[in-house]
Amino acid sequence: MIKSKPLISIIKTLQGIGHRMVERIWRLGAGARLFFLTIVYSAESFKRFHLTMREIYSTGVMSLLIIIVSAFFVGMVLALQGYNTLQKYGSSEAIGVLVSLALVRELGPVVTALLFAGRAGTAITAEIGLMKTTEQLSAMEMMAVNPIARVVAPRFWAGVISMPILAALFSMVGILGGYIVAVPLIGVDEGAFWSQMQANVDFQSDIVNGVIKSLVFGVACTMIALFEGFDAPPTAEGVSRATTRTVVISSLTVLGLDFVLTSFMLVI
Amino acid sequence: MDRTKIDLWVGIFVALGVAALLGLAMKVGNLTSGKIGETYSVTAAFENVGSLKPHAPVKSAGVAVGRVDSIVFDSKTYEAVVTIKIDKRYSFPKDTFANIYTAGLLGEQYIGLEAGGDEDVLKNNDKIAKTQDAVVLEKMISQFLFSKASETDKDAKQSAPASEPEVKPAAAKSTELGDAPF
């Protein structure tokens, strides 16, 4: 019909944009559908709790080491950097407040979620992707076992349960790391370190909000990892791509959600 | 891996998480210090509370004895009515002074109670009559500048006809000390 060359190329570009757009929206819808189905079929993961237990072991317990070590170093660096600046204004006692607020409000939930996406999210995606590639999921369906109830839901709840625990541990270990740098190494007064911290960190508006954040990140990270695995093309390349995408999308989602959640929490 | 081992590890994991959360609440947060046992509440009316907020500490002789419970505006008297919760262990005379102070130069504001000499003590829902408002920095500066300006005005008027150099600095000094700008 249309003969002229530039017109054809314009149409092709538009088609490409449209195709990508439809693809994105389709993935969003499919992810939401999987989330909905996971919630609907999650009764079994509580009735047979050992299924969830096993996943808590592989996502939560196995992530302990990386979380604790990185929290320790993050806390130490925060104290060092904070002291460097605060000491110019003669308020180096406020270092405890700085370290604890930074960790409890932001770094605890966010860095934990990023590490979780890298450590546990990729494992979930690769596992489910490989299950799909080797047709284990289809085999389950043939045996009248719902793969969402048996495979997806326990992993989802394990992630949601593990994330707040890991984030709380991250904050606590980070504060201990900051304490070790600030008090024995630099020589900030110990009493001022803890008392200023206690005076300025509020249980409701800081600690509880941090826990809420980590819960939301837990849902987001685990769901993205599960969906990418469930949706991966059943090839070696497909699984590897899905794993990469899990890390990228989880990280971006966590950082974006963090901004949204923080703005809501500061308003309320 | 067998199930008992997994159970053990998950148990340790959850216990660690709960311990961390408790540690955050007790050691880092103000859950313990924010809790006062039995309290009685007392109100005090201020013309200006500055940036005093609910949950701000109430101190006497530097010791925290209570917390600000609520701050409401009274539309009849156009004053801020502050409700204070004081620990039952501490009692104060009826003529106690309630002042709003600032911790440090720019720190948060708190209420300081200065005990009077009355025999009777404050009871639940009593009102503290003697209060002193928060210091508003802008007001202070403007008053200071205003008094300075009127001073120099006076000086100019005095020195123009008389021209006596010995009296002038002394007079200026006395007004500076005599009527404090705030």
Image (cartoon, rainbow, N blue to C red):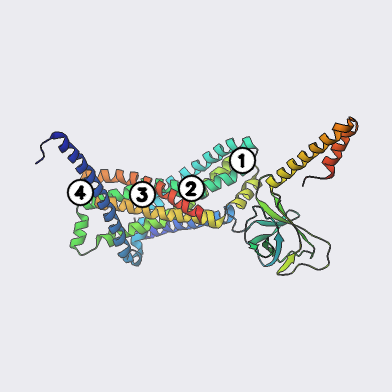
Q: Is B68 drawn above or below residue A263 in the view shown?
A: below
The residue beneath circle 3 is: A120
Q: Position of residue A121 (x, y in %)?
A: 34, 49
User: Do the residues at pointers 4 and 1 share their chain?
Assistant: yes
**Mark positioned earlier in the residue sequence (1 or 2):** 2
Residue at the spot 64% in from the left edge and 40% down from the top edge: A91
**Mark positioned earlier in the residue sequence (4 or 1):** 1
Dot 4: chain letter: A
**Mark positioned earlier in the residue sequence (3 or 1):** 3
Quarter of the image where the N terminus of chain A is located: top left
Q: Nearer the viewer, mark 4 or mark 2?
A: 2
Residue at the spot 67% in from the left edge and 62% down from the top edge: B81
The residue beneath circle 2 is: A106
Left or right, residue A3 beside residue B25: left
The residue beneath circle 1 is: A184
Q: Nearer the viewer, residue A231 or B75?
A: B75
Crowd class of label 2 (few under 14; some 14 to 19; many from 20; radius 10 Å):
many
Q: Is A142 drawn above or below residue A85 in the view shown?
A: below
Residue at the spot 45% in from the left edge and 57% down from the top edge: B14
User: What amino acid is found at the position of numbered circle 4 in the picture?
Assistant: Pro
